[in-house]
Amino acid sequence: MKLSDNKATLSFSNGRPAIELPVYSGNIGPEVIDIRKLYGQTGMFTYDPGFLSTASCQSAITFIDGDKGELLYRGYPIEQLATQCNYMETCHLLLYGNLPGAAAQTAFVKNVKYHTMVNEQMQFFLRGFRRDAHPMAIMTGLVGALSAFYHDSTDINNAEHREVAAIRLIAKMPTLVAMAYKYSVGQPFMYPKNELSYAGNFLHMMFATPCEPYVVNPVIERAIDRIFTLHADHEQNASTSTVRLCGSSGTNPFAAIAAGVACLWGPAHGGANEACLQMLEEIQASGGISKVGEFMNQVKDKNSNVKLMGFGHRVYKNYDPRATLMQETCNEVLEALGLQDDPLFKLAKAVEKIALEDDYFVSRKLYPNVDFYSGIVQRAIGIPVKLFTGIFALARTAGWIAQLNEMISDPEYKIGRPRQLFTGSPRRDVLPIANR
Ligand code: SDX
């Protein structure tokens, strides 16, 4: 970042002397006002719950222009990465800052494949869960449990250890998600098959059984790989910020990623695709497209607490470019599977059209986000609704660990410790219980 010739002056109406705050600029995007010395100079904090106007860090990984609906991973537009590259190339790009050449790609994929198995002890963690446990509860436990297997071999201040942890996490997430699925359906776990692609191997571990050969459908393999790429990273979203804050204490990287999994589960964040599909199924069950108007009235009624899941975004005030690509992927998969008349997909497109013509959504700049179509395509592939967010966590692991490693390799980083505006009781003395 570079010091801007622009300065910020903060003046006070109560006679307190004005102060000048430095302004920094990055390569693209908004400038920042450096408030690091504000408390020291004024005894005052800034106040920004939800961090609507706060840059928590500097990063070179992902850039979003919410007004333009632009998403860049290390400068490359998501539209190009999702159609011209695969998820493994995207992981290399996020981790190392460049798209690999053929030799580097071969070496990277081989390295990831070498780490796809998990310790045999991991299966015993699953046995503690009920078969109907939510997969995100299981994933939070399993990813946290990985820290027990690599705790003493992970010195986060050692760049090589950080790289191995990144490869292990990217390699093992598909195995863990597939194990969570197999456990829920009472089928045996399938070991990774390293001759398959990353996406093909995931489909194999999910849907193969020991009884007969499993052939990966190339259209579905491509779709799953694209879903991974579209979800790989997204700047300082809630779960990435959780991973950074958790990791800033110097904790084990597997534990920090487990914190990200836990945060992603929420319906306002990664849990939205599951919630969106449930919303569409409810509308369908209540009468389908003819009932959309009634549902929209509920959404617009503040007291209903009903949201149009899969719509709206803190940053995008235009189309989420991932939603457009996800809709295309949805079309391709449904066509390939002969499901182009899928009623839910038709309903989703009708809901989108109605919302985009409704002033409530237009005036609030609410557009479809990545979660609006992702549930429909995953359902068509045969992925159970409750596993959608587990797939999101699998894909986002590359971004989480790239952001965590970027933070730790920054010599300026320190433990995150926000302050507060205190609205509780001033000092008071304890009275004996007889006097309370
Ligand atoms: C992800 O941050 C990321 O990058 C996240 C993510 C990633 O890749 O990591 O992109 C993934 O989390 C996508 C978002 C998935 N969530 C959903 O689809 C859930 C539904 N969306 C909303 O909950 C909401 O839009 C948020 C949480 C996504 C964003 O909320 P904000 O920015 O805090 O905005 P807000 O809640 O203040 O809403 C502004 C207005 C409000 O109305 P008013 O008070 O101004 O009258 O818009 C309304 C909100 O009520 N609104 C919605 C709405 N989203 C916002 N009204 C109906 N339906 C919605 N979906």
Image (cartoon, helix red, strand yellow):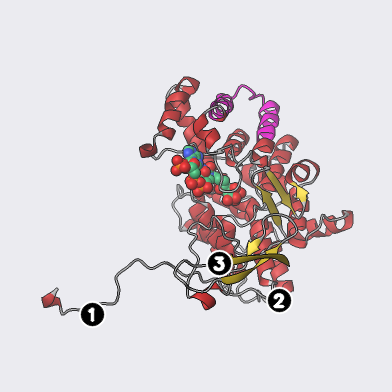
Front residue of this view, candidates 383 and 434: 434
Residue type, numbered disc 3 = Leu
Residue that carries the numbered disc 3 in the rendered image: 10
**SS at badge 3:** strand
Residue 197: horizontal and vertical position, in percent? 76, 48
Which numbered dot is residue 58? none
Q: What residue appears at the point 53 percent right and 49 percent down from the top-left corner?
A: 183
- Confirm whether residue 268 shows in the render: no
Position of 35 with respect to 4 (left or right) is: left
Marks 1 and 3, Cα distance to the nearest angstrom? Answer: 38 Å
Give the main secondary structure of the magenta stretch: helix
Residue 373 belongs to magenta span: no
**Residue 60 drawn above or below residue 304:** below
Quarter holding the C terminus is bottom left
Q: What residue appears at the point 43 percent right and 34 percent down from the top-left corner?
A: 299
Marks 1 and 2, Cα distance to the nearest angstrom? Answer: 49 Å
Residue type, numbered disc 1 = Asp
Residue that carries the numbered disc 2 in the rendered image: 158
**SS at badge 1:** loop
**Magenta stretch in the rendered image:** 327-355
Which numbered dot is residue 429? 1
Position of 67 with respect to 355 (left or right) is: right
